[in-house]
Amino acid sequence: MVTGESTDNDGDGRDNNRPSSFRYTERFEEECGYYLSIGMTYHDYWDGDAAMVKFYRDKHKRDLDRQNFNHWMQGMYIYEALVDASPVFNPLSEKHEPFPYMKEPIPITIEAIKETEERQNQQKMKNGKDAMRAWMVEFNKRFEEKQREGGEIDNEC
């Protein structure tokens, strides 16, 4: 400093020694209610680690996403129920009986989806076995009838 003037003025006509008009305390006080509403304690907000607010915001976002997904799923179930009941309310429908409602919930986890697919595949296999068994019984019955009559055996069903 050659002139001996304070550098606080910087020659722009402003008094830079005055405190800023923005006070962080006011901002913290404004946000306190929000963080209390999402589960943070008063003590944690004012005296805890400052990084905790980030984790509470993240948790709150995840809670909102989960709630939104649950509402969407509820809408899916309501839609499914309305579709299943629609023949009852349609005067032009030939069949005035509702379709049966789902026997199990909609799978949403990877494990539940795999389990449902496995159960469906097992049911298809069982149905196929039952159909083959019924065909075999019918074929054997015709075979025995043909043998009793002394005729030729027809391999077609």
Image (cartoon, rainbow, N blue to C red):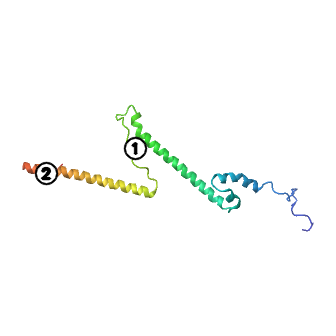
Relative placement, left or right, of 44 versus 113 is: right
Quarter of the image where one finds residue 49: bottom right
Nearest the camera: 143 or 97?
A: 97
Question: Any mark on residue 144, and which?
Answer: none
Q: Name the spot of residue 48 as percent of width and height, x first.
A: 68, 62
35, 8: nearer the viewer: 35
Question: Hey, what amino acid is under mark 1?
Answer: Tyr
Q: Residue at x 69, y 53 (%)?
A: 32
Kindly give the residue lying farthest to the right in the view shown: 3
Task: Judge the density around disc 1: few (<14), some (14-19), many (≥20) Cα neighbours within 10 Å.
Answer: few
Residue 4 % position (x, y) = 92, 66
Q: Residue at x 46, y 56 (%)?
A: 109
Question: Within 10 Å of the Cα at label 2, are there few (<14), some (14-19), or many (20+) other Cα atoms?
Answer: some
Q: Residue at x 42, y 40 (%)?
A: 83
Which circle's residue, 1 or 2, is located before the other in the chain?
1
Q: Residue furthest left?
A: 150
In percent of the image, x 54 and y 52: which residue is there? Answer: 66
Left or right: 87 as drawn, with respect to 17: left
Query: In the depicted view, which residue is nearer to us: 94 or 36?
Result: 36
Q: Please state which amino acid type lies under the numbered disc 2.
A: Phe
Q: Which residue is mark 2?
A: 143
Q: Secondary structure at mark 2?
A: helix
Q: Is residue 107 in sight in this rendering?
A: yes
Towards the viewer: 155 or 63:
63
Q: Is residue 26 left or right of residue 146?
A: right
Residue 118 in the image: state x and y as whole percent: 37, 57
Q: Quadrant of residue 111?
A: bottom left
Is there any visible trace of residue 151 in the rendered image?
A: no
Mark pair 1, 2: CA separation: 42 Å
Q: Is residue 154 left or right of residue 51?
A: left
Vertically, is 77 above or below 95?
A: below
Which residue, given by chain and number where applicable, does mark 1 sit on?
101
